[in-house]
Image (spheres, rainbow, N blue to C red):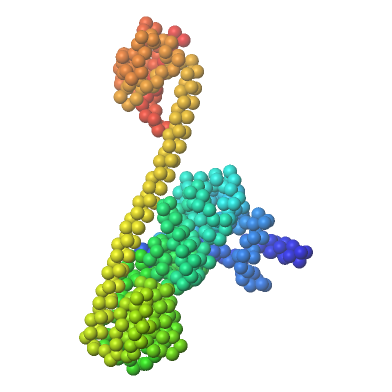
Amino acid sequence: MSTVAQNHINIEAELQAAIGANTLHLHYQPKADLQSGQIVGMEALLRWQHPTHGLIPPTVFIPVAENSELIVRLGDWVIQQVCADIVNWLAVGLKPPSVAINISPVQLQDPGLTSRLSHMLQAQNLISDQISLEITENVLMYRSENIDKAFSDFKQKGYLLALDDFGTGYSALSYLKHFPFDYVKIDKSFIKEIPHNPDDVSITKAVIAMAHSLGIKVIAEGVETEAQCKFLSDNMCDQIQGHFFSRPINAEQMQALLKDRPVLDKHLLRMGKPDRTLLLVDDEPNILNALKRLLRKDDYRILIANSGQEGLEILERNQVDVIISDQRMPLMTGVEFLRNAKKSYPETVRIILSGYTELQYITDAINEGAIYKFLTKPWDDELIRANIREAFHYKEMEDENRRLTLQVQTTNQELISANKQLAEMLKQKQKQISRDELSLSIVREVLQYVPMPIIAVDDEDMVVFMNSSAEKVIPASRIELGCQIEHLIPEAGSGMREFSEGLWFPVEVYGQPFDAQWKNMGEQSKPSGKIVMLIDHRC
């Protein structure tokens, strides 16, 4: 235990020195949109290059920083460095997307965080849209007045909020219901084994559906393969982040990436129309070559495999529409291969091409849906081409139905998101109205104690307020809110037209001489109109 404690002290002391010693640096990992395929955000990731021990992972030094509250200094350094990098990208003519910064529980407890963040942005002439904040799920376990206020302040100032690592902590729907998150990030532990692991598939689909029903967008972390990306795209995920699109890179490399403007392949986009891809699987190379020559004229993207296992590996890396497989192959028969393909890639159209008619075996596979058609060798060229065209037509009809469904779901999601924003705006407006009403009540009460007759009129000179001093000099029978000021004090109405603002002019109020002047409202507040003040001429 003493060794652990000593290591803790060493890390804390050296990390404190590292903040000013140029051994800390940031990497950025971009996020790609699954509708446009473009970079729509990036996450800032802290790295510590120790002069002796080399690269120290954040999992080692971040807990130490949080336990010593050094995380506040560390967090401020990250914010300042992110701001500096954004300014550098803007200076070369780039328009970087929002940069996400991770916020720890200790930082959220700091009441000065919001004001310091705003000050650092203002110092670099940046706005809140250029920064987003990622908060890990376990932060919500430490909910307090400071944390609730921090969330409220973040949203009021226009920062986007993301719930990071969703599903790894004490997940609760109440987190999404009671906190103003704009994004949910599905943890990479759920993405790693999709689309093969049915449990992870179910959890991922459920999180996406749940978040969208609340008007929250979804980002998937740790996306490393095309199959994962395609699954997420087909199931309405909004963005991906992971090595499949880009590894974390330094600021200079990110600048080059933003200049190149990379995009995801169109077949990976939510409503994109993919190329026609055909996978041929046969253990005889001459059969594969003959089929390739025959089908090349039909403008397919053709992939080949010499075994069922190789075919599954190709399916894991590529989006395939139609599969044609031989039946008799070593280690794995065609039917076994297509059964596995159906299990992991049910949207493919699967065809057996064989010279052997193992009737019962193949009939069972057709009946259970593993095989779309059974074709025999040797084949008729035109007949096999026609069957393949029919298979692609069937697949494209299914894809079109899915695309239409996704389009409807996307529109519904956008409507839910818009309704959420409108509800938030209405909530803020109602708060503002409540504050204005309270302020108005206070002002009215203060004016009642002013020993000078005061009358307020609107832009059309209609009386909207009189204090108690004014009510004493005007007969009760003549007091009528909503009437014109000329009805109460004729000389006041004409004087407001003849005399400039702030100048005194004489009026007579029911036999008593007064001096009057008027002031415009609205210079320091929202209300408009005029205030008329009276001073007893005898004073």
* Residue 314 versus residue 481 in the image, above or below: below
As drawn, the residue found furthest toward the front would be: 360
* Residue 111 versus residue 281 in the image, above or below: above
> Can the viewer see residue 524 in this picture?
no
In the image, residue 513 lies at what x, y percent? 39, 8
Compare residues 213 and 433 and report the one nearer the observer.
Answer: 213
Left-right relation of 135 to 376: right
Q: Residue at x 27, y 80 (%)?
A: 388
Compare residues 31 and 44 and report the one nearer the observer.
Answer: 31
As drawn, the residue found furthest toward the top would be: 511
In the image, residue 18 lies at what x, y percent? 64, 63
* Residue 418 versus residue 291 in the image, above or below: above
Q: Residue at x 41, y 68 (%)?
A: 231
User: Quadrant location of residue 65?
Assistant: bottom right
Q: Residue at x 32, y 58 (%)?
A: 408
As drawn, the residue found furthest toward the right would be: 2
Q: How many marks?
A: 0
